[in-house]
Image (cartoon, grey):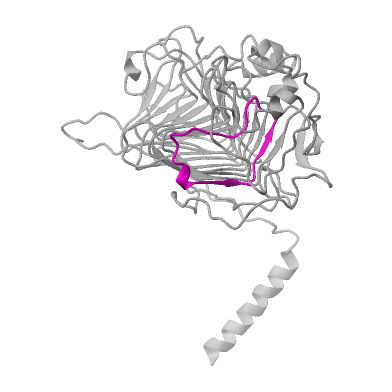
């Protein structure tokens, strides 16, 4: 009884303290995440591992490598700056990731993986000068298991976990050290990930200015949620390109101004695991106009035995709409509830790409009349670019900043938008990655509205 009375007294005291200090004690400090030792030098080179500290800026002007079993972690508010010129592979450094890479930015304190003159390049781009956007100053992050050795005959590789991070301006030519993933001389991507057993998590981040594909996954378990992709691919390239063995979700992303497709899924390759991706609640705008090859370049593309689910997407003023090729796994592709908008008859005629086999479904929102079904964004005019005069292919120089970048636009839905309440949410995302903790995925379930921004405030948070 004495113990019980003591407990009651303590509980009462605790309650009183809680009441007295409720207004003052509004937040408990978040745990500081660290991997291994703190990296003390501000210049990375050679083999690295450990933690890049909050508030610090780090540089690299030569290739750096994270070995199998090691981790490189960026705390919130850290910056990693590539020093390169994009002219040769020797002067376009890359990060070779045989281990695990983690960038844990936050909404209040995002991380940056960019170039030294990024502010100047962004400022030029907002004025319509794109000379330096596609220079490809550095070689991106190259992620795959390292070579087998006597001491490590079966290297496992590692996960890539990127949250609230700006990734920008990769594309330098590949060199002989990249033979496992690139042909020599090809432009490199911001990230290439090749590990069918590991996780690729990209959430709440900003992707900008890659010379070719922004991200390519050639096998892996993915969760790509609530990101903003802008202005990637000089004359070709997707925002997110998937090959054999890619399994997971792509949802609630805002994608504007890709050279070719916003999202492309293919089972090309020999991983032994079928590509299976759910693409839902994405807002896709002005994609496909810089691709010069006939019949290519649009919004969402499934080909060569890929399967998945395609629901609740806004496909707006894209050169081609949904494209399913005849060799995709059509039996196992479920799709419906897209909204298509085109400001010209040419765009309207390609809502389902002519060289594909996709058809309109019962809950699709579309019209044969240009200008119908405007999504009614709070801050974006769908008719501001003249696609009648510039039907594509066109160069970046002919595109206005508003056609390829977010800027001050607002892509949330106004009252009366035809996209409100038209989503399908009775299906499940693909369960392929861990979904809890600092290192896990945060999967936003399918929404009741179409597109990346839900009227209840969920979805994309940019």
Q: Is residue 217 left or right of residue 347?
A: left
Figure quadrant of the N terminus: bottom right
Q: Residue at x 46, y 13 (%)?
A: 92
Taking depth in this image into account, of 167 and 443 the one nearest to the observer is 443
Q: Residue furthest right?
A: 416
Taking depth in this image into account, of 437 and 10 the one nearest to the observer is 437
Residue 342 covered by magenta stretch: no
Quick check: can you spot residue 222?
no
Figure quadrant of the C terminus: top right
Q: Is residue 308 left or right of residue 419?
A: left
Question: Residue 102: where, in percent of width, then height?
Answer: 46, 38
Q: Could you say which quadrant of the image residue 8 lies in?
A: bottom right
Q: Residue furthest left?
A: 150
Taking depth in this image into account, of 397 and 272 the one nearest to the observer is 272
Q: Is residue 136 above or below residue 370?
A: above
Q: Residue furthest bottom?
A: 1
Q: Residue at x 25, y 28 (%)?
A: 147
Q: Is residue 456 left or right of residue 309?
A: right
Question: Residue 343: where, in percent of width, then height?
Answer: 77, 27
Q: Is residue 398 above or below residue 279?
A: above
Q: Across the whole image, how many numbered discs are drawn on residues?
A: 0
Question: Residue 441: where, in percent of width, then height?
Answer: 51, 48
Taking depth in this image into account, of 54 and 210 the one nearest to the observer is 210
Q: Is residue 7 above or below residue 300?
A: below
Q: Is residue 179 above or below residue 199?
A: above
Quick check: can you spot residue 253?
yes
Residue 329 covered by magenta stretch: yes
Question: Residue 125: where, in percent of width, then height?
Answer: 69, 16
Q: Which residues are magenta?
A: 312-336
Q: Could you say which quadrant of the image residue 89 lies in?
A: top left
């Amino acid at each position: 009884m004495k113990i019980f009375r003591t407990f009651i007294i303590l509980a009462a005291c605790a309650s009183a303290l809680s009441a007295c200090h409720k207004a003052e004690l509004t937040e408990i400090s978040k745990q500081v995440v660290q991997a291994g030792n703190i990296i003390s030098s501000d210049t990375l080179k050679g083999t690295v591992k450990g933690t890049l500290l909050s508030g610090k800026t780090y540089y690299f002007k030569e290739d750096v490598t994270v070995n199998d079993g090691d981790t490189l972690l960026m705390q919130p508010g850290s910056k990693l700056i590539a020093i390169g010129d994009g002219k040769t592979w020797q002067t376009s450094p890359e990060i070779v990731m045989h281990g695990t890479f983690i960038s844990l930015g936050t909404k209040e304190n995002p991380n940056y993986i960019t170039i030294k003159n990024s502010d100047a390049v962004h400022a030029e781009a907002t004025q319509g000068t794109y000379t330096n956007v596609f220079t490809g100053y550095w070689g991106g992050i190259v992620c795959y298991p390292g070579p087998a050795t006597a001491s490590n005959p079966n290297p496992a590789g590692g996960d890539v976990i990127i949250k609230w991070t700006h990734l920008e301006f990769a594309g330098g030519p590949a060199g002989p050290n990249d033979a496992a993933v690139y042909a020599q001389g090809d432009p490199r991507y911001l990230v290439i990930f090749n590990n069918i057993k590991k996780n690729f998590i990209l959430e709440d981040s900003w992707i900008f200015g890659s010379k070719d594909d922004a991200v390519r996954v050639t096998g892996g378990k993915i969760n790509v949620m609530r990101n903003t992709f802008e202005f990637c691919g000089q004359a070709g390239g997707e925002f997110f390109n998937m090959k054999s063995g890619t399994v997971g979700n792509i949802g609630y992303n805002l994608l504007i101004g890709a050279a070719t497709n916003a999202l492309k899924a293919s089972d090309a390759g020999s991983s032994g695991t079928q590509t299976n991706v759910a693409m839902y609640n994405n807002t896709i705008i002005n994609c496909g106009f810089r691709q010069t090859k006939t019949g290519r370049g649009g919004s969402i593309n499934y080909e060569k035995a890929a399967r998945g689910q395609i629901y609740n997407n806004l496909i707006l003023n894209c050169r081609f709409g949904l494209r399913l090729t005849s060799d995709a796994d059509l039996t196992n592709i479920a799709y419906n509830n897209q909204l298509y908008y085109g400001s010209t008859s040419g765009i309207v005629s390609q809502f389902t790409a002519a060289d594909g086999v996709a058809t309109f479904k019962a809950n699709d929102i579309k019209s044969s009349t240009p200008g119908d079904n405007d999504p009614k964004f709070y801050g974006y005019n769908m008719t501001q670019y003249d696609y009648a005069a510039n039907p594509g292919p066109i160069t970046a120089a002919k595109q206005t900043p508003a056609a390829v970048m977010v800027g001050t636009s607002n892509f949330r839905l106004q009252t009366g938008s035809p996209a409100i309440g038209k989503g399908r949410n009775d299906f499940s995302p693909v369960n392929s990655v861990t979904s809890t903790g600092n290192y896990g995925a945060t999967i936003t379930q399918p929404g009741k509205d179409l597109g990346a921004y839900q009227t209840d405030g969920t979805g994309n948070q940019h």
